[in-house]
Structures are given as structure tokens and as C-alpha cells.
Image (cartoon, helix red, strand yellow):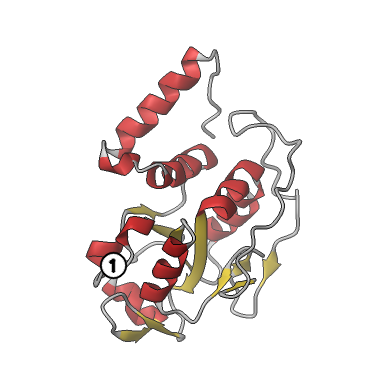
Amino acid sequence: MLTRRNLFLSAAAGAAAGPLWAAGTNDPAAAPVELGDDGLHKQPWFLDSFLELGDDLQMAAESGRNLMVLWEQNGCPYCRELHHVNFQRPEIVDYIEAHYDVIQLDMFGAREVLDFDGQALEERRLAEKWFVNFTPTTILFHRDNAGAGSLRAAETFRLPGYLKPFHYLSALEYVETGDFRNQPFQRHLQDKFERLREQGIDPDVW
């Protein structure tokens, strides 16, 4: 895992793989995925955090990055799908590594987390406070929200449940590019589809 003191980006992997709209690039057996002692799938680019979320967002912002909080639970089939499908896509992993620090939380976990408002809660209590009802739930925090004193002020965009690769990457782009300030996510997707069609590309949105 990445630590606070080691935030160097890993080298881009799988550069020869096709783009997200190319079919047949999401083989669940493409690479092994580590399973932690907590039963959650792990990625080498997860941040090894002190779980002080205000500080995590501040540190990400100081590096020109955003913060992602990824909620999962042991035995969740769609969490497995996220790791074995979405996180096997070089385009998604490269984009995350370039623009996001990622913290994984357990919806039923007992680790203490310091919320943006300074309240210390176990993961499971924080999940209740944040109305996290599905796993995986991906919550994105734009760097401009560093210093926010509440979840409401800090949160930029939420993905409740599993999104397929095309839409998942589009959500990451929606926040990173700042387009969330200009239009709803559905319109962002429509504009992206239109740009691809103008290039003669029929997106594979699986």
C-alpha cells in the first residue's frame, strides 16, 4: 500500500491494452487480486492512511490530487466485480493513480475514523452517518473542498453501487475535470458519447 510518506505514482501498467470502448479487455482472470485479512479485496495503490479524512483530503489537495473513499464489505459480489473487472482496466487504474488518493473502508468495520467534522467513529458507525447503504460505494472528494468541516461540504460525487467500467471512469473524469460544476453527470455522459461518435467510435459501455 501507499503510505503518507510515499505517494510516488506507480509506473503505468498494461500500456498495450486497448481503450475502454474496446471489447474483450475485462477478463476477470487477467491478474490476481489480493484478499486481506478483513476479507476485502486490496490494491497496491490504496493509501495506508491514519483515517483522519480531513487531513487525507488536505494532503491530496496539496499534491494536486483528489480523494476517493471506497466502501466495501466482506463477501460482496459487486465489490469483487469492481476489483476483478474495473480495476483490471489499465485506463481506470492509470487514471486513479494519476488523480486520486484512495482509502478503503469496511461498511461493517471497527477501525476508528476521524470524520471531516472532527467526530471519531468506528467505520460501521461512520457508514450509517454517511448513509452508505450499498457496497461498493465510491465517494469522490475534489481537491478544492480541502478544509471542509463536514461531509456535505466535502463530498463532490457519489457512486452508490457498482458501475460498469465506462461509467466508472466517466465519473472519475467528471470530478477531476471539474465538469461537476457545469452540468449533471447524465449530461456529462451524453457529451462524452457524442464526442466519441464524432470520432467514429461506438463506445462499449459494458
Q: Position of residue 73 (x, y in %)?
A: 50, 70
Q: Residue drawn at (35%, 43%), measured in percent from left and top?
A: 178
Q: Quadrant of residue 6?
A: bottom right
Q: Position of residue 103 (x, y in %)?
A: 50, 68
Q: Quadrant of residue 194?
A: top left
Frontmost residue, 97 versus 122: 97
Q: Which residue, as the protein is rendered here, is positioned at the far front?
A: 62
Q: Quadrant of residue 83?
A: bottom right
Instruction: Inspect this view and state whether residue 172 appears.
Output: yes
Badge count: 1
76 over 53 or under it: above or below: above
Q: Residue drawn at (65%, 29%), measured in percent from left and top?
A: 23
Q: Residue drawn at (45%, 86%), measured in percent from left and top?
A: 110
Instruction: Inspect this view and state whether residue 68 appears.
Output: no
Q: Position of residue 171 (x, y in %)?
A: 42, 44
28 over 46 or under it: above or below: above
116 over 162 or under it: above or below: below
Q: Amino acid at mark 1?
A: Phe
Frontmost residue, 84 versus 105: 105
157 over 194 or under it: above or below: below
- Which residue is tagged 1? 131
Frontmost residue, 107 versus 68: 68
Q: Position of residue 57 (x, y in %)?
A: 40, 67
Q: Is residue 49 left or right of residue 67?
A: right
